[in-house]
Amino acid sequence: GYKTGIYASLSWLNNQLNSPKLDKYDKWVAQWNDRCTYEKKYVMWQYTSDGSVLGIEGRVDMNKYYM
């Protein structure tokens, strides 16, 4: 199975994708920062593009998922 959601930067979520019609969809916020400042509900936060994972060469996006 799968679940529909929206992945976007904080700026896009606040300024272009801010319709109440989209509130029913899960949000995945890309905000490279020490904390997520999106004020609506979200289920995932991408906090950096400069992470590392053993076995993967180069930079890796890092995310936190909130169940």
Image (cartoon, rainbow, N blue to C red):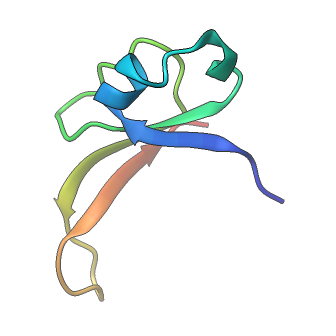
Q: Is residue 25 left or right of residue 11?
A: right
Which quarter shows the C terminus?
A: top right
Rendered image quadrant of residue 56: bottom left
Position above or below: 36 against 50: above
Task: Indicate the position of residue 16 as horizontal and vertical percent values.
Answer: 42, 24
Q: Count every numbered label the image shows and give the total.
A: 0
Which residue is painted at 27% across and 82% down in the image? 54
Q: Is residue 26 left or right of residue 37?
A: right
Which residue is painted at 41% across and 45% down in the image? 64
Which quarter shows the N terminus?
A: bottom right
Identify which residue, 14 or 16, lies in the foreground. 16
Task: Indicate the position of residue 60 as horizontal and vertical percent values.
Answer: 26, 68
Q: Is residue 65 left or right of residue 46?
A: right
Position above or below: 42 against 18: below
Rendered image quadrant of residue 36: top left
Which residue is painted at 67% across and 30% down in the image? 25
Position above or below: 48 against 15: below
Identify which residue, 53 or 3, lies in the foreground. 3
Task: Indicate the position of residue 17 as horizontal and vertical percent values.
Answer: 48, 24
Question: Farthest residue toward the front?
Answer: 16
Which residue is painted at 49% across and 16% down in the image? 18
